[in-house]
Every structure is written in structure tokens, then in C-alpha cells.
Amino acid sequence: MSEFFPDVPKIVYGGPKSRNPLEFKHYNPDEVVDGKTMKDHLRFSVVYWHTFKNGLSDPFGLPTAIRPWDDGSNSVENAQRTARAAFEFLEKLGAPFYAFHDRDVAPEGKNLKESNANLDEVVKVLKDEQARTGVKLLWGTANLFSNPRYMHGAATSPNFDVFAFAAAQVKKAMEVTHELGGTGYTFWGGREGYSTLLNTDMKRELDHLGRFLHMAVDYKKQIGFPGTFYIEPKPKEPTKHQYDSDAAACLNFLRTYDLLGHFKLNLETNHATLAGHEMAHELEVAIGANALGSIDANTGDPLLGWDTDQFPTSFLLTTQCMLAIVKMGGFTTGGVNFDAKVRRESFEPIDLFHAHIGGMDAFARGFKIAKSILADGRLGAFVKDRYRSWDCELGRRAEEGEASFKDLEDYILPKGDAARNQSGRQELLENLINEFL
Ligand code: XLS
Ligand code: NI
Ligand code: NI
């Protein structure tokens, strides 16, 4: 079927020497690495909202995107045609997964009942297309931020009716995600945060959010949805402060409300940047808590202070991501989900292919570089060696909670001054990474 992208063939692996922009240079889906194909290691996913629905408007200008499948109407028919275009794209690209918000795939009706009915009509097409192509749903989610009703938030809205509406919307979104065999369901806070503390009872709002997520956990059990629940941290935008501001804040929230066992984190690169962290930092925080589930792969622009959601092309960035993910043992349920959009000036359908091919190649290359760095072993050995002084009897006891201040005093007093330090060798290690890029 070639209706919407007639000039684009199935994207194949051409190798690093290929000069064809519509071929992969590094991503060879069938190549086996450590007993698993690249396709299964990287689990690439395309997002519905940016790739099929985003008109590329910005705060200063109207949409520019040419999207032949979209007649601009709010009809179910338009949504169904968009779904077919989406699957033609997914199939040609060879992406094994996609992700959506309820309102990306189907138009909102004049009330919830009508919206749910619209969704059901489009889900039929999505189901058929999934069966036809073998493409799977990585995760679903509910859009709890676009409609004006959510101006004060959804689960943290001061308006109880809005809270109830959000609950009903998530209930339905979970049902269709389950019906489509989704491997996960994501909670991104949307507008869960505040613009000013002057009008905000923060503790009460957080309590409400905790309750909301418990109800979601209960409903998950009730319908037997086996997928993973994800929380996606973001520090700001659209609100001044989002409650899920970074990985550490999310983990603290989950722990406080006794939800930690039920959620993993879905980390987004540009959100890490906005939080003042490197993506690698966020990954380490999540992995340390055994809570990394999936990543929203993108990047920001250092000169622009907002969530520009650009496609990741830096090998250094993808290497840093994949070093953490490979060390963790790889993805189990999540994947590399391109929550990324083409620039407003890249308005043609073909740009969507260039963007995804580049992102997939960058991650494939980052994956291989990370594997080489780990196989080389020098980096890991350096880090291990840096802590070797702890590998003594008292060090072990201190790590295991079996030593007291008095024990440490008894140990160090006769030694005189503290032991000699060794260099952190940051520059040497940065050079070492560059050997592999
Ligand atoms: C917005 C978020 C959003 C989530 C899904 O910044 O990244 O796209 O991934 O709701
Ligand atoms: Ni995201
Ligand atoms: Ni984002």
C-alpha cells in the first residue's frame, strides 16, 4: 500500500558508505548483537502527536506542515485516514512501535460519550493496521492538557468535576491501550503543577494526584492490563513548576504515596535539560532506583530555553544514553520513543523520514559505541578502581551498616591525616570516550 508516501520505498540498511538519504547508515534491524537483533535491542517507536498530527505552528506563527492525509476536519473519517497514513509510514520506516494520546488518534466530541465513541471507531482501524503490519503500541496516554477544561490541571485541578472528567478519560484511554495490546501506559503531568503558589494548596493537590494514580493502579488490576505504568518527569512548561519535575522528584512522590512498585519512569532528554540535568544523570537516578522503564528520545537546543523536541543526532548523546541502558541490561518493556518533531521549516512529508532515519541511526551508532566501550573495559575498570579503598573489612562494614562513628574514629585516629586522594582523571576519560566516537 503506497497512498500517502508514494515516492518513499521501504527504508533499508545501506551501511555507513551509503549516500542515499532514505537508507539507514548504522541501523541494521536484523543484525544480531549478543543474541538479539538491533530491532529488539532498540525498540524504536514513533509518536503520533508530533509525526502525524503536529501542524508545526509555534507561538509566533501558523502551522506550516503539508500533511496530505489530514483534511483539517474534526471528522472520524479524517482520523481513520490519518491512522492509515501513520501505518504506511511506520511500515516503510520499519519502526516496530508507536505511541499516542487518545486525542491524537480520534477527535474530541461534544461530550465524553461522543469522544469515547469516536475513539472506538478509530481504534478499530488501529487494530486492523496493527494486525496487518505487526507494528505494536509501545504505550498509550490521555491528553489531559489541551482542552481548556484542564487549564488548572487535571488530577491536581481545584475543580472536582475536572478531576472526575480526567479519571473517566484515563479509564477509557487505559481500556483502548489494553485492547490494542499496548506494552505500557504513560502518565505525563500535562498541567499538573502551578503558575503561582498564591492560589495553590500544594499538599492537597499532591494528595489528589496520589489518589488518582492509586485509582489507576486499581483499575489496571481490574481490567487485567499487563503493561507497565510510566511517569514522565518534566520540570516546567506549560506550568512554572510541574510536580513531576525530575526523576528524583518523581521517585520521592511515588515513595511518599506508596506507589513505587507500580510505576517506572519514562525519561525525556529535553525534559532533563530543562530540569538542569544531563540525560545521563536522569538515567542514573532512575536506574539506581530500579525504575527506568522507557525513554522519550529527543534533544533541545542549548540556545532555546523550551521543549523544542528536536530529533537526536549527536553520537555523544546517544552513546551516553545507551551506556546507561546497556549497563542496566537493556529495555524490558519500554523502548526508544522519538518524542520529537521536525522543525517548522521542514514542512514536507519526506522530512519526517529524514528525521526518523537520522534518530534511529544515531541510536544504533550510540548503541554500538556503548557496547565497544563496555567491551573495552577501561572505563568500568577506572570507576571500580576509584572506590577500591572501600574494599577493606571496615569499608565493607560501613557499606553494610555495621560500622559506627566510633569504629571509624578508632580506625582513622592512628593513621593521622586522611589517606591520599587520587586524580579523578576527567580529561583522560573524556579522551577515552572520544576514541570510540
Ligand atoms: C510533553 C511530553 C509529552 C508526553 C506524552 O512535553 O513529552 O509529549 O511524552 O504526553
Ligand atoms: Ni515525552
Ligand atoms: Ni516533551
Image (cartoon, rainbow, N blue to C red):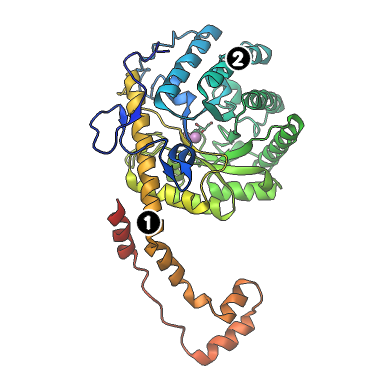
Task: Name the image quarter holding residue 52.
Answer: top left
The 10 Å Cα crowd at callout 1, few under 14, some 14 to 19, many 20 or more, is many
Residue occupying the point 59% across, 53% down: 289
Q: Helix, strand, or loop for circle 2? A: helix
Q: Amino acid at mark 2?
A: Lys
Residue 352 rendering spot, x and y as whole percentages: 36, 24
In the depicted structure, whether residue 318 falls above or below residue 58:
below
| Residue 343 visible | no
Tag 1 residue: 373
Indicate the quadrant containing the N terminus: top left, top right, bottom left or bottom right: top left
Question: Relative to 412, is 305 on the left or the right?
Answer: left
In the depicted structure, whether residue 408 falls above or below residue 144:
below
Q: CA distance from mark 2 to mark 1?
A: 45 Å
| Residue 411 visible | yes
Residue 230 rendering spot, x and y as whole percentages: 59, 39
Question: Relative to 244, is 64 on the left or the right?
Answer: left
